[in-house]
Image (cartoon, grey):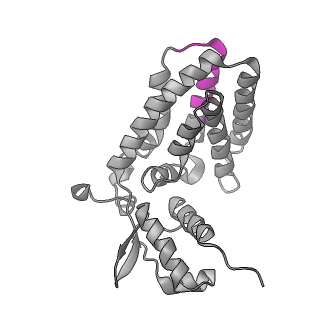
Amino acid sequence: MSAPLSNREIYKILESEIVALKIVPGEVLTENSLCERFKVSRTPIRSVLQRLQENKFVQIVPHKSTTVTPINLEVASQLIYERVAIESMVFRDFMRMAAPTDVEKVRYSLHQMEALAEKAQDVEHFEIYEFLSCDHAMHELWFLRTGKDVLWQRITRPHPDYSRLMRLDVVGAKNVAEVLADHQEMMRMIDTRSEAGIEELMVRHLYGNVRRLGGKLFSDEYKKYFQPLNER
């Protein structure tokens, strides 16, 4: 018989499922169902739920329910703004100091994205999260090369608003062509050491999900995911 999962392991599973929208905003998490699922007592489950509340993934109403929080679009938008500012500076620093081997590491990540993107027409079998993992790896290179690993860890850790807004954009792999084009432009800038237009590119790239979702963010299809405007 396998050992029960630790509190940390249970937390990471639930956090990941909330971020991936497998557990949607407004869904109620009961102690009984979680105890049964993870084969543990109420004490570790209560500890996990408390931590999820501290990180704003759920809201606990004592003696009533634990509910997954909605996405606050204003908070998510401010975090995108912050990342645009940070990543523009880091990308510029990378271009100024990158050695030929650093450039080729970026090119290798881009080639991986291009190879995966060729399969995007077959939506049913396309591995969108593998594509996004290559996207993630390409950005990570300039943060690590410039010694900004702490910043990278901070801006990429799971967030109840920013991370879930990002996930809404990957359904059906409709973002692949635009995301790939942005990365190809980043590669061109690195090859030519051209710093002109970095901020504009990062705004386009990092706000791309908001632009692609557009008015759907406020449609009946999507409004269930978001905190009502008058509550923000």
- For the residue pair 48 and 15, the one nearer the viewer reads as 48
Q: Is residue 132 above or below residue 57?
A: above
Residue 83: x %, y % from top left: 46, 36
Q: In this picture, which residue range is highlighted in magenta?
A: 180-195
Secondary structure mostly taken by the magenta-highlighted segment of the chain: helix
Residue 7: x %, y % from top left: 59, 72
- The answer to whether residue 146 shows anywhere in this view is yes
Q: Is residue 30 magenta?
A: no
- For the residue pair 114 and 28, the one nearer the viewer reads as 28
Q: How many marks?
A: 0
Q: Quadrant of the N terminus?
A: bottom right
Q: Is residue 133 above or below residue 59?
A: above
Q: Is residue 182 magenta?
A: yes
Q: Look at 39% across and 58% down and name the residue there.
A: 222
Q: Quadrant of the C terminus?
A: bottom left
Residue found at the far left of this picture: 230
Q: Look at 71% across and 34% down and name the residue there.
A: 109
Residue 23: x %, y % from top left: 50, 68
- For the residue pair 224 and 9, the one nearer the viewer reads as 9
Residue 216: x %, y % from top left: 38, 51
Q: Look at 54% across and 59% down and name the residue there.
A: 20
- For the residue pair 126 and 167, the one nearer the viewer reads as 167
- The answer to whether residue 24 shows anywhere in this view is no
Q: Is residue 82 above or below residue 26?
A: above
Q: Look at 64% across and 51% down and name the residue there.
A: 129
Image side of residue 163 versus residue 133, left or right: left
The image quadrant of residue 12 is: bottom right
Q: Is residue 140 above or below residue 125?
A: above
